[in-house]
Image (spheres, helix red, strand yellow):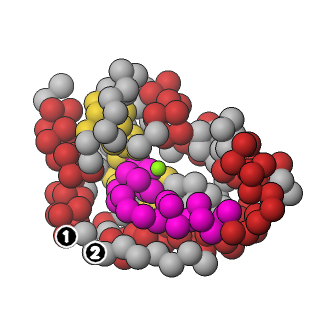
């Protein structure tokens, strides 16, 4: 069975959580926050925090304390139920195990996901190649960041679907939101 590998945050749901998480980091960093914002221009979140002496475990602890306010998504449930008949559904996220499990549970899709991988499963975060060990040629990868979620899968021969407002010519398909996935799946299956 072919797989669909989904990023989680800003891909399977979109809300204020990203902002709340960013606020929690800035609060924690206190006087180091200017430096952090400067580092973020050229580095990822965890990398920037590492430079400032904050390790991955501390980072995940900060994230785990941000309340996750996400509602059950009936529309998404229906789509995944349908697609899950023909594909193995996988979630691959840089977030902590707790956050990934919580978000999937609150969305109401945890029982529809065959397997999920989180930031504690890997030494390095996406886009590090080790995170994509499960991706095989003709699998489908879905994410909101071409660089973090889709660039490596594309090299591995996967079909790439970018979720977001801006199109990226490197992605095989771009959809505005996850609800457009069903329509795109029909065109993929007709190739
Ligand atoms: Mg994302």
**Residue 169, x across and y down, in percent:** 36, 21
Is 178 inside the magenta-drawn segment? no
Please state the total of marks drawn on the protein image.
Answer: 2
> Is residue 65 toward the left or the right of residue 52 in the image?
left
> Is residue 67 toward the left or the right of residue 80 in the image?
right
The residue under label 2 is 72
> Is residue 164 toward the left or the right of residue 81 in the image?
right
**Residue 140, x across and y down, in percent:** 35, 39
Is 7 inside the magenta-drawn segment? yes
Residues tagged 1 and 2 counted as in contact (Cβ below 8 A): yes
Label 1 within 8 A of ligand 1 by Cβ? no
**Residue 69, x across and y down, in percent:** 41, 76
* Magenta segment: 5-26
The residue under label 1 is 74
**In the current view of this chain or complex, which residue is farthest to the right?**
53
What residue is at 18 percent from the left and 25 percent from the top? 191
Instruction: State whether residue 124 appears in this view.
Output: no
Instruction: State whether residue 112 appears in this view.
Output: yes
What residue is at 31 percent from the left and 75 percent from the top? 71
Please say if 128 is above or below 30. above
Residues at marks 1 and 2, CA–CA distance in whole angstroms = 6 Å
Under circle 1, the secondary element is helix
Q: On residue 123, which mark appears?
A: none
What residue is at 46 percent from the left and 75 percent from the top? 68
Under circle 2, the secondary element is loop
Q: Nearer the viewer, residue 3 or 61?
A: 61
Please say if 34 is above or below 130. below
């Amino acid at each position: 069975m072919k797989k669909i590998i989904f990023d989680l945050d800003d891909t399977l749901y979109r809300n204020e959580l990203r902002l709340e998480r960013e606020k929690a980091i800035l609060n924690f960093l206190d006087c180091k926050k200017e430096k952090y914002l400067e580092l973020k221009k050229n580095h990822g979140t965890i990398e920037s925090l590492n430079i400032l002496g904050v390790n991955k475990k501390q980072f995940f602890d900060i994230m785990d304390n941000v309340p996750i306010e996400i509602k059950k998504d009936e529309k998404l449930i229906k789509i995944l139920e349908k697609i899950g008949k023909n594909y193995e559904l996988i979630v691959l996220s840089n977030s902590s195990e707790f956050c990934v499990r919580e978000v999937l549970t609150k969305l109401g899709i945890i029982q529809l996901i065959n397997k999920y991988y989180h930031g504690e499963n890997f030494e390095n975060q996406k886009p590090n190649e080790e995170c994509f060990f499960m991706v095989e040629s003709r699998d489908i990868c879905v994410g909101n960041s071409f660089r973090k979620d889709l660039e490596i899968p594309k090299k591995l021969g996967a079909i790439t679907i970018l979720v977001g407002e801006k199109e990226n010519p490197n992605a095989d398909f771009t959809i505005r939101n996850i609800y457009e996935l069903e329509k795109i799946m029909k065109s993929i299956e007709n190739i």
